[in-house]
């Protein structure tokens, strides 16, 4: 599983397009109950519980918006209550001014005055460089302002929603915030999401229903706002049209960026909509200065136009993995320029080049990166590594999580980290990471540094490690022990995950439902996992070459036995996001709302909710009894209560010790009768003849098993028995038993 980057406006920055499907799936299923197959009888009757979360990263970073009063004065706000200033050349360090509240918007009409709104219903004001304290707009209805616009330090309008998602607005006039006294129509239930105010103290606000409303300030004798009871539809011909942003140079001249790919222009009283960007652009931001406007979509494409905005320039493109979250344009002789900020804390300058085509100049480093955990990998029960979007790694060693350590400065930080199981991780590790630009890093021991591997021209999309690591690109190119490409990758399909149980045996999956198996150093086509392309296989984990589990975004789990895949088992209505298997009888899968499910060798069962409604970005099970999972900030541990098990070889009966046909039996004892497989051997060497049998209960605390070994010689022989363990029962070995094999 690789981290899906959920941005402020829309899901962007994910490793593949299924991220959008996942987000929609989570919302669609949020009201439904989780579904799973009934749990098999087990010794564990109490609910499986996770430890309380251990914070690994602070709630900091993740820029949401920016406002520029001039070319040398910009202020950005983030999701952790911090602000940062830009002087035209450098950014200040983020400064916390609003607790841990997430800012939603900011407007700076001058270099001495700004207003920022947050997701907790507050506003914070900057006067002459000093930020005030967070102040609630109201104590009733729990209003949250999604946007704010100030035409001057004496007039601002903030718009948003109440607790029941109805539209609401507050205006600032001469230092005093007031509630709008005009009543909205009862049929107007669409919350506001963007606003722009002009120098004439006229504002236009867009809402989630695709409408726009005009507000006009009347200053005397008593300040008030005038507006209609119902909004005007911007583009009724486009189903589902929603304005994402708005910028006005006059009350009758505005530009709106939609949530899809359109830009709408108000000229006089008429709105005209044009699809300027590719479908699925995931939201368009607009900003104007003087008579010039710039429109920028979320994936880094921009156009510009001069009023009346009937002709737009050709597209300028940002060659950078980024989601633009804020855009602010300002006067820059002889025209205008803009500053954009992305979700990863980078600032990006936009200037208008030849024919007014926007040109991007990204900053070389992030000024306010988000610190969000992306994945976790465990090499043992006591050694794990977690990664975050700020390019940091946090290590668990000896039961204690260390401090974050920066390993990369690329946008999106570390997407994923994976480690092979190691008995001595302090001395020997096989770990790899995929960073934001899809380059690969490797770590060989806990005392070493992360180093680049593979060519810069070889992107990696998925990775798995045993004693060495295997890297897979979206188009199925494999780098590592296995070389070449996945055979016959379907057109339009992408390789989504890979898992290596040993250094030479790997399994890969794609989002079209196919699997691929390594044979030595090459890939071969494996059996089809599922034939429903809309399910989209998402994550994969192999405990042995003959046991793997794959999960899809529709909530199904599939098992591989080395030959074929089982039919899908519906585990969660909320979609499955990650899976990790510590043994053939112990896997953990996570869903999109903090849920986790355990496979016990036969069925799936739910654990108690792990992280509220937070997505678990990663899970790693390095043993048969413990797993570690991470959400955006915390690490959680799940430990399976395990009974000690004793194994005894029974005395061989008369007639059972014949060469070529030796019957051997064992008794296993625990607190309750254990279940699972035992391996019985005629000799203690790995190559000794052996057989495998299933334990069957013979009493409340004992089970037995027997099988026939094809013995190859006569004489004294040490018989051996091994119990590999099962869900709730610890592995054990019997004391070797000496017996004489006789000739037939």
Image (cartoon, rainbow, N blue to C red):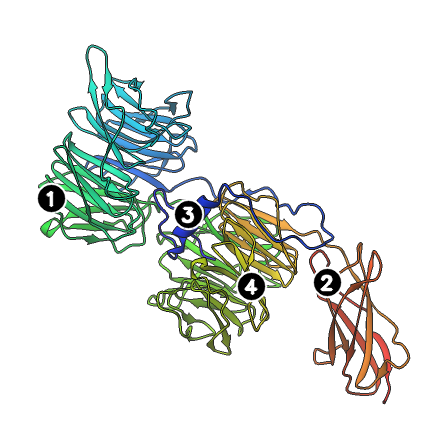
Residue at (51, 78) in percent of width and height? 519
Identify the secondary structure beneath mark 3. helix
Residue 310, labelled with which disc? 1
| Neighbours of disc 3 within 10 Å: few (<14), some (14-19), many (20+) | some
Real-space Cα separation, disc 3 to disc 4, in angstroms: 25 Å
Image quarter where the C terminus lies is bottom right
Say whether disc 4 or disc 2 marks the residue closer to the N-terminus. Answer: 4
Identify the secondary structure beneath mark 4. loop
Say whether disc 3 or disc 1 marks the residue closer to the N-terminus. Answer: 3
| Neighbours of disc 2 within 10 Å: few (<14), some (14-19), many (20+) | some
Figure check: 714 above or below 647: below
Nearer mark to the viewer, of 4 and 2? 4
Residue bearing mark 3: 24
Residue 135, position as x, y percentages in the image: 38, 22
Say whether disc 3 or disc 4 marks the residue closer to the N-terminus. Answer: 3
Nearer mark to the viewer, of 3 and 2? 3
Residue 567, position as x, y percentages in the image: 56, 63
Q: Nearer the viewer, residue 292 or 82?
A: 292
Residue bearing mark 2: 731
């Amino acid at each position: 599983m690789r981290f899906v980057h959920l941005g402020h406006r829309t899901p962007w920055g994910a490793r593949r397009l299924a991220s959008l499907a996942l987000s929609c799936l989570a919302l669609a299923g949020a009201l439904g109950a989780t579904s799973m197959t009934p749990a098999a009888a087990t010794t564990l009757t109490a609910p499986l519980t996770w430890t309380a979360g251990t914070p690994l990263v602070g709630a900091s970073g993740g820029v949401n918006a920016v406002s520029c009063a001039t070319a040398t004065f910009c202020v950005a706000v983030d999701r952790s209550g911090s602000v940062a200033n830009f002087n035209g050349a450098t950014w200040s360090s983020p400064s916390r001014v609003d607790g841990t509240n997430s800012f939603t918007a900011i407007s700076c009409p001058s270099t001495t005055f700004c207003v920022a709104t947050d997701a907790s219903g507050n506003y914070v004001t900057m006067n002459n460089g000093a930020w005030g304290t967070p102040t609630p707009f109201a104590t009733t209805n729990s209003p949250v302002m999604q946007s704010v616009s100030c035409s001057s330090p004496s007039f601002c309008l903030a718009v948003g929603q109440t607790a029941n998602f109805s539209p609401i607005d507050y205006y600032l006039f001469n230092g005093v915030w007031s509630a709008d006294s005009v009543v909205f129509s009862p049929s107007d239930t669409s919350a506001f999401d963007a606003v722009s105010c002009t120098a004439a103290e006229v504002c236009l606000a867009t809402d989630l229903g695709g409408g726009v409303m005009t507000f006009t300030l009347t200053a005397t004798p008593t300040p008030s706002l005038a507006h209609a009871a119902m909004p005007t539809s911007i583009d009724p011909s486009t189903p589902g049209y929603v304005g994402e942003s708005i910028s006005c140079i006059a009350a009758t001249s505005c530009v709106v960026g939609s949530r899809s790919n359109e830009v709408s222009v108000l000229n006089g009283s008429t709105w005209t909509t044009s699809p300027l960007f590719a479908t699925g652009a995931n939201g368009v931001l607009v900003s104007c200065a003087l008579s010039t406007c710039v429109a920028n979509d979320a994936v880094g494409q921009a156009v510009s136009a001069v009023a009346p905005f009937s002709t737009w320039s050709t597209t300028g493109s940002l060659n950078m993995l980024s989601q633009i979250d804020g855009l602010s344009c300002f006067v820059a002789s002889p025209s205008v320029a803009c500053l954009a900020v992305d979700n990863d804390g980078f600032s990006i300058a936009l200037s208008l080049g030849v024919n007014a085509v926007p040109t991007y100049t990204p900053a070389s480093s992030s000024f306010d990166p988000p610190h969000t955990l992306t994945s976790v990998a465990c090499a043992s029960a006591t050694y794990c590594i977690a990664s975050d979007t700020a390019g940091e790694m946090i290590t668990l060693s000896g039961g204690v999580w260390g401090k974050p350590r920066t390993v990369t400065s690329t946008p999106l930080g570390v997407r994923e980290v994976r480690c092979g199981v190691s008995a001595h991780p302090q001395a020997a590790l096989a770990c790899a990471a995929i960073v934001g630009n899809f380059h690969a890093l490797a770590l060989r021991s806990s005392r070493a540094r992360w180093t680049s591997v593979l060519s810069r021209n070889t992107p990696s999309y998925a990775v798995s490690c045993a004693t060495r690591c295997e890297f897979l690109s979206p188009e199925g190119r494999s780098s590592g022990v296995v070389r070449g490409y996945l055979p016959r990758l379907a057109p339009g399909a992408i390789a989504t995950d890979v898992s290596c149980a040993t250094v030479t045996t790997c399994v890969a999956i794609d989002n079209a439902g196919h699997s691929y198996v390594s044979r030595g150093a090459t890939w071969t086509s494996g059996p089809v996992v599922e034939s429903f392309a809309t399910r989209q296989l998402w994550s994969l984990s192999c405990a042995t070459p003959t046991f793997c589990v794959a999960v899809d975004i529709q909530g199904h789990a599939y098992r591989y036995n080395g030959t074929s895949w089982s039919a899908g088992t519906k585990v969660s209505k909320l979609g499955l996001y990650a899976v990790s298997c510590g043994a053939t009888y112990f896997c953990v899968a996570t869903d999109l709302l903090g849920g986790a499910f355990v496979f016990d060798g036969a069925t799936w069962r739910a654990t108690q909710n792990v992280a509220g409604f937070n997505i678990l970005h990663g899970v790693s099970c390095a043993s048969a009894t413990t797993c570690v999972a991470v959400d955006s900030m915390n690490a959680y541990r799940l430990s399976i209560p395990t009974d000690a098990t004793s194994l005894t070889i029974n005395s061989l009966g008369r007639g059972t010790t014949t060469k070529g046909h030796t019957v051997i039996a064992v008794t296993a004892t625990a607190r309750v009768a254990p279940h699972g497989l035992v391996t019985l051997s005629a000799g203690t060497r790995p190559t000794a003849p052996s057989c495998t049998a299933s334990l069957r209960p013979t009493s409340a605390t004992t089970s037995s098993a027997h099988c026939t070994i094809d013995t190859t010689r006569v004489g004294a022989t040490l018989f051996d028995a091994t119990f590999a363990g099962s869900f709730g029962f610890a592995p054990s070995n019997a004391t070797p038993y000496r017996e004489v094999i006789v000739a037939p």
